[in-house]
Amino acid sequence: MTLTSQPRPTAAASPSVEELVDLFLAVMGRLGRHFFECSAEFDLSPQQAKAFRELDQPLSMKELADRLLCDASNVTGIVDRLEARGLVERQPEPGDRRVKRLVLTATGRELWQAHHDRVFGCEVPALAVLSADDRRALHDLLSRMDAAGRQQDGDHPLA
């Protein structure tokens, strides 16, 4: 009787950085598509939807630009369109009237909540396949990645 040696199972090769980035971008694309499709139901462009989401609390124009990772001049047009719809108003900052604080109007708060409920009140397809334990693990990993990036870059946490 001849014994043939079976190859020993080896630990799966660690995914390359390229593979991880590709997967991460693919999932981000799916999450973004979900967010933007839901936002379109509220007649919000992708840029307006991203800005609108950040305004759950009053922010200065500069703070909003920082959160959106764009120049303050780009935020002006976005805010102009939200303001024209009666969703946001610019208010002077107490103590520095040069700074404008962006505040949701009553209509804006209602739409913000309805938008939030639509985007997050359903099973988000890219996340629906994860168990509660998987979601906790993913949250922990993403939180560590975000914290490391913020420490390195000196950025604020993404909301």
Image (cartoon, rainbow, N blue to C red):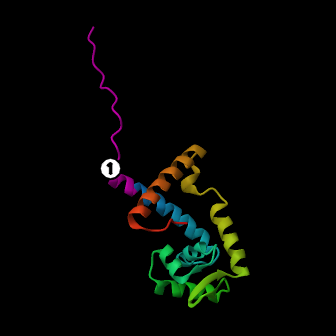
Disc 1 on helix, strand or loop?
loop
Left or right, 6 with reference to 43: left
Task: Determine the residue positioned at 52% across, 62% down.
Answer: 31
Residue 65 vs 120, above or below: the answer is below
Left or right, 150 with reference to 93: left
| Quarter of the image that includes the C terminus | bottom right
In depth, the one of 152 and 50 nearer the eye is 152
Task: Determine the residue positioned at 28% across, 19% down.
Answer: 5
Task: Determine the residue positioned at 61% across, 82% down.
Answer: 102
Categorize mark 1 by other alpha carbons within 10 Å: few (<14), some (14-19), many (20+): few
The segment highlighted magenta reads 1-22
Q: x, y (%) of residue 113?
A: 69, 70
> Furthest-front residue in view?
95
Q: x, y (%) of residue 77?
A: 52, 87
Residue for badge 1: 16
Give the amino acid type for the residue marked by disc 1 in the picture: Ser
| Quarter of the image that includes the N terminus | top left
> Furthest-top residue in view?
1
Left or right, 53 with reference to 1: right
Task: Determine the residue positioned at 34% across, 29% down.
Answer: 9
